[in-house]
Amino acid sequence: MKPRTWIIIGLIILGAISSVYITQNINNVSVTIETDGSDVAVKTSSFFSTPEQMNAEMQQKVLEQIIEPNSTVSSIENDIKAIAKKYNYSATVTIVSQFGTNQLPMPATVSGRSMVPTLQDGQEIISLKTTDYKVGDIVVATHPDRGMIVKRLKKIDANRVYLMSDNRNVEYFTAERYLGNGLVKIYTYKRVPLDTWLPRENIIGVVKIY
């Protein structure tokens, strides 16, 4: 067979391989989510440019999920893959934060004085969602009556943890109740630090930045 014929055959084979590669990769998209718990950037990489609407939906979804206490790396990954699927893309998702790859931060705001002097009322904090915690850590957890709380981890049992407030002061308050005819009744009550046992799964994460 002549050399020219071999060259032609080689070009045909190369073209076929390239065509298969393009076909297999044209609808694949790599999604990198960069976040520090405050700012979020969603970056997509594909053989061709991705739809702006898809990128915008992904950005909005991540912004919603970053502040959601129940969100996880897996849940965010599944949400992004579902959005990509709407646009006929198959996505691979990576989350990158200041804590590492696929380490998910969550922002929160301290409410109340229970962690004074360590944390102040209204202070912004960043926690890392994790099950890797130890006695002495400040953690964010969910309480059945108080909602999301920030406390110091004092004890760890097999299935539960004991959380305590840093602020050990008992605060006293007074309130007035008008009884009519000019009569006023004065009430005095006190607020004690919240110390509580909770199931281990109620811990959302460990406070890393404050």
Image (spheres, helix red, strand yellow):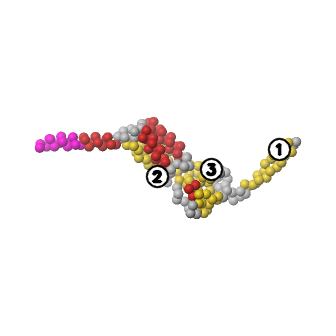
The picture quadrant where one finds residue 161 is: bottom right
Marks 1/2: CA distance? 57 Å
Mark sitting earlier along the chain (2/3): 2
Classify the position of the N terminus by image quarter: top left
Q: Residue at x 56, y 49 (%)?
A: 69
Determine whether the residue tagged by mark 3 lies in a helix, strand or loop. Answer: strand
Q: Mark 3 — residue?
A: 147
Is residue 181 within the magenta segment?
A: no
Residue 51, position in %: x, y? 42, 36
Residue 9 visible in the current orientation: yes
Q: Which numbered tag is attached to residue 26? A: none
Name the mark on residue 178: 1
In the depicted view, which residue is nearer to us: 131 or 116?
Answer: 131
**Disc 1 + disc 3, Cβ < 8 Å:** no
- Looking at the image, is mark 1 or mark 2 earlier in the sequence? 2
Residue span colored magenta:
1-14
Within 10 Å of disc 1 (Cα), the crowding (few <14, some 14-19, many 20+) is few
Could you tell me if residue 123 is visible in this image?
no
Residue 141, given in percent of the width and then of the height, sits at 59, 54
- Identify the residue at image location x=40%, y=39%: 88
Question: Left or right of 108: which side holds 75?
Answer: left
Callout 2: SS? loop
Q: Amino acid at mark 2?
A: Asn
**Residue 102 numbered tag:** 2
Q: Nearer the viewer, mark 1 or mark 2?
A: 1
Identity, as a three-letter code, of the amino acid under mark 3: Gly
Tell me which residue sits at (86%, 45%) in the image: 183
User: Going by the picture, which residue comes out furthest to the left?
Assistant: 1
